[in-house]
Every structure is written in C-alpha cells, then in structure tokens.
Amino acid sequence: MAGALPVLYSFRRCPYAMRARLALAVSGEPYELREVVLRDKPAELLAASPKGTVPVLVLPDGTVIDQSLDVMLWALRRHDPQNWLAPPNASMDEMLALVAGNDGKFKRHLDRYKYPNRYPEEAAGDAQAFALLHRTEGAAWLAKLDGTLEGGWLFGARASLADMALLPFVRQFAHTDAAWFAAQAWPRLQAWLAGFEAGTLYAGVMGKHAPWREANAQVQC
C-alpha cells in the first residue's frame, strides 16, 4: 500500500523491544508503534509471529522481522547516521559475538536473578540463594564489560550497535537492586549506563503509550 509504514509491535520495558526502538529511532526510519500487553496479545501480533514475543516488525510488503537484532540491522543498513555498524575498534563479527554473549549466558543469569520464582525446580526451594548465585555470575560478565569501556563505549569513543544492543539488558540488571549495583567497583560501566539513561535517544524511545487495539489511532514514530 502506497504510504504504508512498517509496524512495530513492542512492549515498553522489554529490553529486546527497547533495542529495536533505539535502532529505528537513530536511523530515522518512520514506523507505526503498537504497544502491546504481553498477557493479552493482539491477534494481529500472533498472526504475524506465532511465537508471540516482541519486538515484531511487519514491513509494508508483508515481510516479518521478529528477532530484535535483525530489526536493528534492518534499520541501520537502511540508514546509519551515527555509524553504529562501523565503530572505531571492532568488526561486525566482533560486535555480533559480544551481543551473542549478552543474549546467551548473561541473559540466562539476568532472568534468574530478577525472576527467581519462575525457576522453582532450579532453585530447589531457596529462591533468594538462587537469585544471588545468578547475580554473582552476571556480575562477572559486567566486570568484563567495565574493563572494555576505556573509551567510554564498548568499541571506542562513540556508540555502536553493540552498546545499544547491550545497554537495555544492563539497565534491567542494574535496576533489580539499584543500591547493590551502585556499590560495585564498576565506574566505567556505571557511567556508561547513566549516560545512556540521561540521553535524549533513550528518552525518545521510552514514552508511555496506551495498549494498541485495531480501533485505536496509530502512533507514528
């Protein structure tokens, strides 16, 4: 349809959806935002992507992109004004390897630290000890990131795809126990996260929107 926009199904606090919105915002690609309630997913989302997770980007020609990193790459390959795909000190393969580490082992520890009651069989009756174990494991990953941030960003003196793919997850970890996070000896990591949260890009993708339903007015971004 002439003039149709890509449609992004999103959930404001989901770190996967957040990273997709960040890339779409910095690319300048216009799209229609559909904020969803994950416990009451609209039929249109499930028709586009039966797995029912966000983000899901539906292009005007019907193409569906339902992996967050793929949404980022789609947007940035169309327009990358801040050169997120070409940081000073890394190749694309190096960035993707770091993202894979975040989305694999670190995300596993994050989930079990933040939501220990979701894993009763693994916790063996002691959810608190289970959460603290996974906090310790996740902290080891964060300490390594702190050591890479000498230039202020993961791969040099400016932001990259890797920074914006990881920051939403580090934010979620940090806010699980903000006092504990602030007490850790990670000055570069803490400054990296604080700068991100204070930035206009972050503010621009974190506005609150009413849940989308087909009868609702569109929200264009």
Image: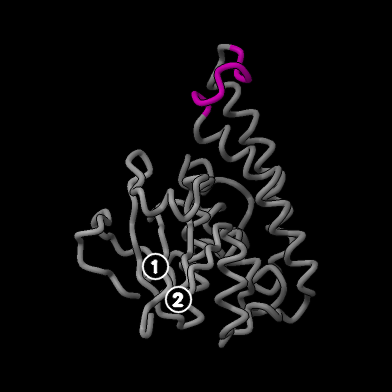
- Asked if the magenta segment contains residue 10, the reply would be no
Label 2's element? helix
The residue located at (60%, 16%) in the rendering is 121
Query: Relative to 39, does residue 159 appear above or below in the rendering?
Result: below
**97 or 72, nearer to the observer:** 72
Q: CA distance from mark 2 to mark 1?
A: 7 Å
Mark 1: amino acid = Val
Label 1's element? helix
**65 or 21, nearer to the observer:** 65
**14 or 144, nearer to the observer:** 14
- Residue 205 is labelled as 1
Crowding at mark 1 (Cα within 10 Å: few <14, some 14-19, many 20+): some
Residue 51 rendering spot, x and y as whole percentages: 52, 45
Q: What's the colour scheme?
A: one colour
Residue stretch rendered in magenta on the structure: 116-124
The residue located at (56%, 15%) in the rendering is 126
Query: Relative to 184, does residue 39 appear above or below in the rendering?
Result: above
Mark 2 vs 1: CB contact within 8 A: yes
- Quarter of the figure that contains the N terminus: bottom left
Is residue 200 found left or right of 120 in the rendered image?
left
Is residue 154 found left or right of 40 in the rendered image?
right
Q: Which residue is mark 2?
A: 25
Give the residue at the far top of this rendering: 125
Residue 93 rendering spot, x and y as whole percentages: 80, 68
Q: Quadrant of residue 31?
A: bottom left
Mark 2: amino acid = Ala
Residue 26 rendering spot, x and y as whole percentages: 49, 79
